[in-house]
Image (cartoon, helix red, strand yellow):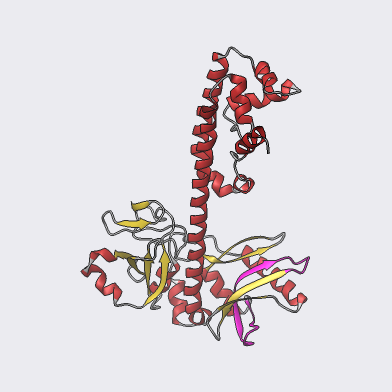
Amino acid sequence: MSTKNKRMAQWGRIQPERRALRDVETARLAESQVRLIRKELADWILRARRRAELSRRAVAVRMGYGKPERGMSRLARWERGEDAVWGDRIPTLAQALGAPVEELASFSLRELSAMRAAKTSAQSRATADAAARLAELRILARYALELSEHGPVERRLGELPDVMLRSCGWSVMLHGGGHFSLQLLMHHWRNGDLVVPCDCCGGRLLLTWVGGSTFSGSHGFRGICLTTAQVRSLKLSDPCKASEQLSLTSRIARSRPHTVRHDLTLAEVLSRAGLKVPAVRIRDFEGAPLAIFDPASGGITPTTHGPLVAACLDREIGQDLLVTTRRGPTRVGGRSVIGALAPLSFGAWLGESIQLVDGATGAWSL
């Protein structure tokens, strides 16, 4: 490869990954920083062009555009801060403006750095949300039998606020998708509407997720086996029954109640209903214990508080949650919340500022 080709290949690497450009969450997290960098870039290009006393057409011709109008349009986008300068356009534009190429490249490198940081943060949030849904589903599986039968638990839960379950939902083609609330799910479990035979034991499988299409015949179900209290995924061998279940689920989902609390956790609601929900241990990014969440009181006690945490440590630990991202509380002016159980956010409140540790950003507090 010639020296010129090597140099052009080097510049060609200064551009974002196509996947990062399509990732909505990465773009959202990087948006404010990217906007600022592009504004600075626009000012820099405009100053350099005016200092060189060049028109847009002249710059486009110097850049080698066969049709100057195309180059002028591109230059106008750069000067309005609507786009960054990527790849081999960096040395080409710098040479056309008679400006230092390193200065021009610095804007693109800064934007790449911002996008990479946003991508890392987006992946961290996705990991946190996935762990949150799994924790919620495991708690639901633990008490599935009590929740699927009529009795005292049903009456007590009927007096409490309903809670939206992020681990349970539906996605049926042409009928949309969404999440089930706890009371809606319980009601249809008891009616047998969201119950199918389990393929592992032939017993009842309480559905927590339904997805597919009533037209193509594709489908997938996830639920809790009442015999083993395990979460299982399956496909029904009878396409007619699968289609009937998909249609039934779409009708159920459209009838879901409108008064649902999004700021309560499943653990807190079940604890208020009289179920002995185990405590939850919160760990930092490296796995070291940070705090204990008590669903009965809704309190979070940092393990660094010595005697204060002793009573909580004596309790059974039901779940371990990993703090993987910086999040704020879901409850404004309220008490404690761990979004990994809600889910939505991680947080702590003890009447004063409490610090937890985030493996990516160091200490943070709410």
For image coordinates 46% across by 72% down, the residue present is 158
In the depicted view, which residue is nearer to us: 118 or 243? Answer: 118
Residue 288 location (% of width, % of height): 35, 65
Residue 366 shows in this picture: no
Q: Is residue 342 magenta?
A: no
Residue 220 shows in this picture: yes
Residue 182 falls left or right of residue 65 = left
Using the image, determine if residue 193 lies above or below residue 20: below
Residue 308 location (% of width, % of height): 23, 68
Where, by quadrant of the figure, is residue 289 drawn? bottom left
Using the image, determine if residue 363 lies above or below residue 319: above
In the depicted view, which residue is nearer to us: 109 or 182? Answer: 109
For image coordinates 62% across by 21% down, the residue present is 96
Give the residues drawn in magenta, as a range: 195-218
Residue 366 location (% of width, % of height): 33, 53
Q: Is residue 210 magenta?
A: yes
Using the image, determine if residue 229 lies above or below residue 4: below
Residue 208 location (% of width, % of height): 58, 72
For image coordinates 52% across by 32% down, the residue present is 107
In the depicted view, which residue is nearer to us: 13 or 278? Answer: 13
In the orientation shown, which residue stands out farthest toward the front? Answer: 2
In the depicted view, which residue is nearer to us: 320 or 105? Answer: 105
